[in-house]
Amino acid sequence: MSHPYPPAGTTQQLPPHGQPPYPPPAPQRNNLVPWLIGGLVLLAAVASVLAFVLLRADDTADSPPAQESAQVEDQLGDVDGDAVVPPEADEEQVPDDHGTPYAGDGGLIIGSVDRGAAFLDDVVLGDFPTAIGHGGSDFQSYYAGDADLLSAEIAEAAGGTLPVNYTIDAVSFDPGTASDVLDVTLELPDGSYDGMVVLVGQEGGTAVVIGFQ
């Protein structure tokens, strides 16, 4: 029986017994550098977002809400120099001559409009002792310096509240009381209007307030 041999001129190296004919490839080592760089970038991004959120939270805490700011401003009171700033009223309620000084005629008492206007000025300003001083002797005797009584009766005549402004609309003479009757439109704090009359008579040649209703 014949045995095969390699061709002449060649040799065949056989590996030792028990070893594979070719060596296995060496396992590749994992490269950690890209992973480290990616982790650092992610960490920086998270830190930036966290810092932004914390700064916004601080700004929100330092700035009061708009409603709270408005309430604070309301508590400061009137700072525009006007003693009274009445709210805006419905245009349909505003008389055509509202705010215009009376320049007509119809009365007979000289100085009745000026005296009535001086009286109403003090009423609107809340200076009731001075308002009493515009009255005649009977008027002053009735109130006897009681400013609270005059304030209460003015409020009652004005529908339950004190006026913040007024307009004298017309003047006529009343023979029964021998006085000029001043028709007045009162502006109330809520922006509404009510009517009142002021009676101005004459005492010692001087126009004086003798009553109102």
Image (tube, rainbow, N blue to C red):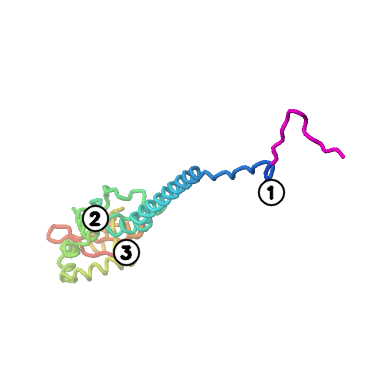
Residue pictured at 33% horizontal, 67% vertical? 160
Residue 76 in percent (x, y) is at: 27, 58
What stretch of residues is rendered in magenta?
1-14
Residue 207 in percent (x, y) is at: 17, 58
**Given the current orientation, which residue lies at the most extreme top position?**
9
Residues at marks 1 and 3, CA–CA distance in whole angstroms? 122 Å
User: Where does label 2 land, which residue?
Assistant: 83
**Given the current orientation, which residue lies at the most extreme left position?**
204
User: Where does label 1 land, which residue?
Assistant: 18
Q: Is residue 10 in the magenta section?
A: yes
- At label 2, which amino acid type do we have? Ala
Viewer can see residue 188:
no
Viewer can see residue 167:
yes
**Given the current orientation, which residue lies at the most extreme right position?**
1
Q: Label 1: how many residues lie within 10 Å, few (<14), some (14-19) or many (20+)?
A: few
Instruction: Work out whether residue 63 or residue 44 is closer to the camera in this orientation and state it.
Output: 44
**First of labels 1, 3 by sequence position:** 1
Q: Label 2: how many residues lie within 10 Å, few (<14), some (14-19) or many (20+)?
A: few
Which disc is residue 158 wearing? 3
Residues at marks 3 and 2, CA–CA distance in whole angstroms? 20 Å
Secondary structure, mark 1, is loop
**First of labels 1, 2 by sequence position:** 1
Give the left or right position of residue 202, taking residue 195 as reference.
left
SS assignment for the magenta stretch, majority: loop
Residue 8 in percent (x, y) is at: 76, 29
- At label 1, which amino acid type do we have? Gly
Residues at marks 1 and 2, CA–CA distance in whole angstroms? 113 Å
Which disc is residue 36 wearing? none
Secondary structure, mark 3, is loop
**First of labels 3, 2 by sequence position:** 2
Instruction: Work out whether residue 91 or residue 117 is closer to the camera in this orientation and state it.
Output: 91
